[in-house]
Amino acid sequence: MGWKDLNLTWHYVEKWAEAKPAAEALVFGEERLTWGDFKKRMDRIARAYLEIGVEKGDRIALLSAARNEFLLSYMAAGKVGAMWLGLNPKFTLDELRYQIGDAQPAILIAVRTFLGNDLAGTITALKREFPFLKKVLIIGEPVEGAEGFGDFVDRARPEFDAALTKRAAEIHPDDEALLMYTSGSTGKPKGVVHTHASIVENIKVEVLKFYVNEETRCLLHFPINHVAADVEIGFAAIMAGGALIFMEQFDPVGALKTIENEKITMFGQVPVMFLLQMKQPQFFQIDFSHVRLMAWAGAAAPKVMVDVLSGICGQTGSMLITGYGSTEVCGFVTYTEKGDDINTLLKTAGKIAPPFELKIVADDRRELPDGKIGEIAVRGPFMFKGYLNKPEATAAVMDKDGWYYTSDLAFKDARGYITITGRKSEMFKTGGENVYPREIEEVIETHASVLFSAVMGVPDEIYQEVGWAFVMPMPGKEVTEEELRELCRTKLANFKVPKKFIIRPLLPLLASGKVSKLALKEEIKDMMKT
């Protein structure tokens, strides 16, 4: 049976465990697991879930960073028909309360320590507050009233062999498999529900577009609540039979060393990660000769980043690929192509990958011609099932024909490549004219000393709204408001030139690497009061 015929997430673990049981699959620190180990441990965890009483449709939450238990617990959840949820140990107690209270998992698995911080108080509070938790299991020293994850799942449970076989046979591709919460950049996070089918059908395309295969060695340092970890890197490696090397969090120097020492062939990052690495003296001494693919998404890439990476590709023969996607569509749905020029990599997010569909629409959802800015709508088997506990929110973004309206604005060129211009909610009107912040940000970021910018519409008594530009210079560089204003005047119509430039060494960033415009909105409110 070829990989195209497999339609449940854990099928791929079983496939590779049979095909190459001794090959390396998962690496975290000193622990190296083969595909044979992966399947054995996945099944042990699945039998433990059944003993606890997990039913089809239940949720299982893991509070942890990227480590071997991440994919072991995730694949095991799918095999018993449960929906898996990753929780970031950097979250505050209130953030965890919100997501656990909304998801209501039957089991919470949690690391006892994260980067030297003891999470005992957080875990104890969650255990006390949520009686729907049937079991709390701890990776590390257990807290009171909980059990050790390793000791619990490693118990022999031969009496559950038949039950696991029966349960696995009852799982359907359309069953819920993964729950991810949106970043909350524009409000309270929403739980995005994905099925086995939406995950598998998206990644069938990605492994082709990213040229992933059995020899691929992927670096994964994203938090496990992120689509890049749960699908784009984590599941892509499982589907293709490659190896995954985990890091608890992104560390510029540590990641560079891992790329060299583990002979990484593929790694995906957000632009800010690449830029932080390029600041390190070690960057230009690292052996990138094994790398075959470097990918990014989540934010526009500065020219300096693409220039440096292109130089590496010229020496090693590796590829640069970027694209567009979201949590709701299970990762990338558009891709640039191998060999695309620097301008295409800088300005566009690629084109829709067959058999997926994309159109650009007006406010009335009528399709627009090439070159016109409108909302991105996509359709395909990658689609999320809906927002957990929020049917009205789901209905607002999905129509009866299966189109998902993303709230992202873009235009499409004659080749089918899309250029992102911002979020629908970010567009503002000044003096009756529509202004798209991304257009202005791109101009500001052409300045040699600018790393990131964020343009916001701010209320104005005369013009209705005017633009304010928040600007983050490159480390060690300086830029003045006068320089930026003159740059904008030479490239933009006068009504698009920001009325105010706020230059600061750091801007608030989301985990995705995007500037947090929600945080900036709060700052603007405070600034306008004074």
Image (tube, rainbow, N blue to C red):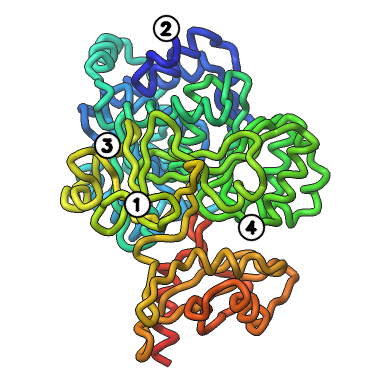
Query: Foreground mark, 2 or 3?
Result: 2
Determine whether label 2 and label 1 are within 8 Å by CB. no
Q: Residue at x 52, y 47 (%)?
A: 349
Q: For marks 1 and 4, give the CA distance.
A: 29 Å
Task: Give the amino acid type for the residue marked by disc 2 in the picture.
Answer: Met
- Depth-wise, is mark 2 or mark 1 nearer the camera? 1
The first of marks 2 and 3 along the sequence is: 2
Residue 199: x and y, percent?
37, 31
Residue placed most toward the observer, 60 or 406: 406
Residue receiving disc 2:
1
Which type of secondary structure does the marked residue at label 3 adopt?
strand
For discs 1 and 3, the disc positioned in front in the rendered view: 1
Does label 1 or label 3 sit earlier along the sequence? Answer: 3
SS for dot 1? loop
Q: Is residue 214 above or below residue 496?
A: above
Q: Does the image show residue 21?
A: yes
Circle 3 residue: 59
Q: Residue at x 41, y 58 (%)?
A: 373
Residue 219 percent coordinates (x, y): 60, 36
Q: Earlier in the sequence, mark 2 or mark 1?
A: 2
Q: Residue at x 38, y 27 (%)?
A: 201
Q: Which mark is residue 368?
A: 1
Q: Amino acid at mark 1?
A: Leu
Q: CA distance from mark 1 to mark 3?
A: 41 Å
In the picture, which quadrant includes the N terminus? top left
Task: Point out residue 299 in the picture as x, y percentages from the top left corner.
Answer: 53, 54
* Residue on which the image places disc 4: 302
Q: Say whether disc 1 or disc 4 marks the residue closer to the N-terminus.
A: 4
Alpha carbon separation for disc pair 2 and 1: 43 Å
- Is residue 134 rendered to the left or right of residue 3? left
Ranked by sequence position, the earlier of labels 4 and 2 is 2
Residue drawn at (60%, 15%), measured in percent from left and top? 23
